[in-house]
Each structure stands twice: as C-alpha cells, then as structure tokens.
Image: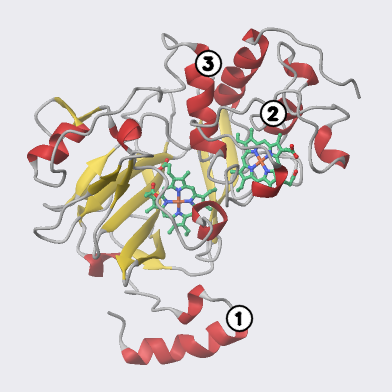
Amino acid sequence: MISPRLGSLLAPLCVALGTISCAEDPGPQRLSEWGIFADGATQTAVEGLVEYELRAPLFSDYSSKHRFIRLPPGETITVEDATGRLLFPEGTLIVKTFGFHEDLRDPSSPERIVETRLLERRDGRWLPYVYLWDETASDATSTRIGARVPVTFTDLDGEERTFSYRVPSVTQCGNCHGGRDDIEILGPRVEQLDRDHDYGSGPENQLEHLVSMGWLAAMPTGSRTFVDPADETAPIDARARSYLHANCAHCHRDGGAADQSGLWLDIDETGESRLGFCKIPAAAGRGTGGRSVDIWPGDPDRSILMFRVESDEPGIKMPELPAVLVHDEGVEVLRAWIASLPPRECAAP
Ligand code: HEC
Ligand code: HEC
C-alpha cells in the first residue's frame, strides 16, 4: 500500500522511536488514497461507506464526530451473542472523523474538520491510522506522532472557549482500544447501534439498515439498556451507566488500562464494589481529594469519582489524557445519579 521508498525513509525513524506500531506499514500518506470521501469538508462518504451513530458516544472535548464502516464486497458482519459486539471480516475499514462546530448550540453552524482515524482489519488484527486535515479540508495527511491543534468554539452556555486539542499518536490508540491482546473495536455493538440514522430518506433504524444491505444476516435481538445520556426523559440510572460505559469502560474493564484500579464501569458490571460503591481506591494520594471512597451512595461530594471527573488537572482528571476539558453536562448526569442512590454509610476518611 505504501511506496517502498517512503517505507525505507520511515524505517530508521521507527527504530529510533522504538515503537511496535511503527514497524508496521504506515499506510498511504494521504487520506484521499483510501478513496472514502467524496467531499471531506462535509464528510460526504462515497458509496459503500456507511455512516453510523452510537446511542451513548464518547465525549471528546466537545468535538463533533462522523463514523463510517466499509466492508469488502460480499462480506458480512457477525454478532457475538454473549456481548452483542459486532465482529467484522478481514478487509473492513472503520472511520472516525473529529471536527468542531463554531457554535455548539447550533448544529448547522460551520464545522471545522480536524482529524480522521482509521482502523483497518488486516491479517486478523486492527491496524491504526491517523490523518490531519488541511485548512480547507481538501485532503488530510498521515501523522503517526499525533498533534496539537488550537481550537475555538462557542459552548452550550454561549461562552467562547479556546484550547489545545490533542490528536493522539498511533501508539496512544492502544491506551483505550487495547484489550488483553490487540486493538479492539469499542463502539459498534448491538445496543449501541440500535437507534435511528437518516441515510437520506428519513430516519431509519441502523440495524435494520444493515440487514437491508445484507451486512447483517438477521435483525439481532437485545435488551435496551443503553440510552443517550443526554436524554432527560430516560431514567437517571440508565443515563449514568450508559455514560460510564461510553466514557470510562474502555479503560475501566477487565484487561483495560485501568484494570488494576479494580473499578470496572462496563454497562454489564453488576458487582457494587467493582462499580465503586463504598470502594476504597487502589491508589491513594492527590487523586482522592481527601475523600475515602469512589462512590458514596447518596453523596456526590464525598465521592472520589466526582472529584476526578470535575478536575482538569493532569494526574487527577478522569478520563485521562488526551481529553483535556471537563464535560460539564456529563458531570451533571453523574452527580444526579450518585445523589439519587439510596444513602448508605461507607467507611469515613
Ligand atoms: C481516549 C480514548 C481513545 C483513544 C486514545 C483513541 N480512541 Fe478510538 N475510540 C474510543 C472510543 C471510546 C470509541 C467508541 C466510541 C465512539 O465512537 O464515540 C472509539 C472509536 C474509534 C473508531 C470507531 C470504531 C470503534 O472502535 O468504535 C475508530 C476507527 C477509532 N476509534 C480509531 C482510533 C485510532 C486510530 C486511535 C489512535 C490514533 C484512537 N482511536 C484513539 C476511544 C479512544
Ligand atoms: C484512558 C484510560 C482511562 C479512562 C478513559 C478513564 N480512566 Fe479512570 N483511571 C485510569 C487509570 C489508569 C486509573 C488508575 C490510576 C489512577 O488512579 O490515576 C484510573 C483510576 C480512576 C479512579 C480511582 C479508582 C480506584 O478505585 O482506584 C476513578 C474514581 C476513576 N478512574 C474514574 C473514572 C471515570 C468516572 C471515568 C470516565 C468518566 C474514567 N475514570 C475514565 C484510566 C482511565
């Protein structure tokens, strides 16, 4: 896929950096070589690249996101029954673009397209790629080392915000996507995809659309525990658990980067102590804010979890880098949830 000349130019740099992913094929230099967008600025996909949305998305510093899947001709997706996760065939490409709307209160305000990440299924593994868009979003250039991009937008309260957005390096992909073995797919699972999307002829259920395309053999069944955390009509417990899953569980799960903390926030987790109820943290110190347990049911202000999601200080902030901004709306959901839990006495500090 990459010219031998470019490959040999990159090889010494990779040896110097000593990274594993660098030893791999760095892929095309230009995103246009993948032939996936008819128009980058509007994120208009070519035929065969199918857009999807999640019920409960990951918050990434108020960026907008565009997600797409491309399957090789004639291939299908299978569903892992126990988890509802989708299993993709060799040659699948999953695409995720990050941008920023000028004004978050107005989804039709101009959007600056910043970066596009790819995961390509090859030789039984997912290979990561990142591309940085040029000013006019005419094309994007491969970066393996990430970048910082100054971004300005108007937030939901009408205030102007400027910050340095972080594009991760390819070695950082594994911090969140890494399971026990290799890079894993995080978003697409049955319950997350079970929502409407407009493919051009009005809202349509995404799973039904995949069935109609022949990508899924049959309409998968599944309960509906996932809700949109921003949906104020949904029960607070479902909103908070969906939020924790989407924003924390990729690290806070068996085999994830925060495995050792013993705090597991997957939506399927039922153990109260694992979920942080009256749980004494694995690591003490600055990251506790002088509080004794991760979640003090009924009392957000005695819960370490709130202290960490309300902080933007490196070393305390949750989620960890590369996200840098506090998610005020997410914090509100978690605060309301902990306050709603039947009060209980945990061990005092
Ligand atoms: C801070 C954690 C984090 C980092 C770092 C990260 N991702 Fe992700 N990524 C996620 C989560 C969580 C999702 C699923 C939720 C969503 O799409 O909103 C996701 C979704 C994706 C998707 C769509 C398929 C899927 O797994 O759901 C692609 C493609 C992707 N990421 C590529 C990358 C690449 C390439 C890198 C490294 C350059 C990277 N990501 C770094 C957390 C991360
Ligand atoms: C990119 C990986 C990552 C993400 C995403 C992440 N965390 Fe963490 N978290 C860690 C790591 C690593 C630790 C252990 C080291 C430490 O305490 O800083 C940790 C520790 C914690 C602790 C202390 C737990 C204990 O019992 O020791 C809390 C509370 C916490 N995280 C809350 C959250 C919440 C809430 C979210 C989502 C809003 C989140 N984290 C997202 C990596 C992550």
**Residue type, numbered disc 3:** Asp
Residue at image x 50%, y 22%? 156
Label 2 belongs to which residue? Answer: 273
Residue 301 occupies which quadrant of the picture? top right
Mark closer to the observer (3, 1):
3
Q: Is residue 140 visible?
A: yes
Ligand 2 quadrant?
Answer: top right
Name the residue rendered at 59%, 44% in the picture: 323
Q: Which residue is mark 3?
A: 237
What amino acid is labelled 2 in the image? Ser
Instruction: Give the Cα distance between marks 2 and 1.
Output: 39 Å
Residue 243 at x, y percent in the picture: 51, 28
Contact (Cβ within 8 Å) of mark 2 with mark 1: no
Where on the picture, by quarter, is residue 200? top left
Return the disc, 3 or 1, that comes first in the chain's sequence.
Answer: 1
Q: Nearer the viewer, residue 70 or 235?
A: 235
Q: Is residue 43 visible?
A: no
Q: In percent of the image, x 65 and y 25: which residue is there?
A: 272
First in sequence: mark 2 vs mark 1: 1
What is the crowding at mark 1: few (fewer than 14 residues within 10 Å), some, or many (at least 20)? few
| Disc 1 target residue | 18
Give the alpha-carbon distance from disc 3 to disc 2, as whole Å. 16 Å
Q: Is residue 298 left or right of residue 100?
A: right
Disc 1 marks a residue whose amino acid type is Gly
Q: Earlier in the sequence, mark 3 or mark 2?
A: 3
Between label 3 and label 2, give the one nearer the viewer: 2
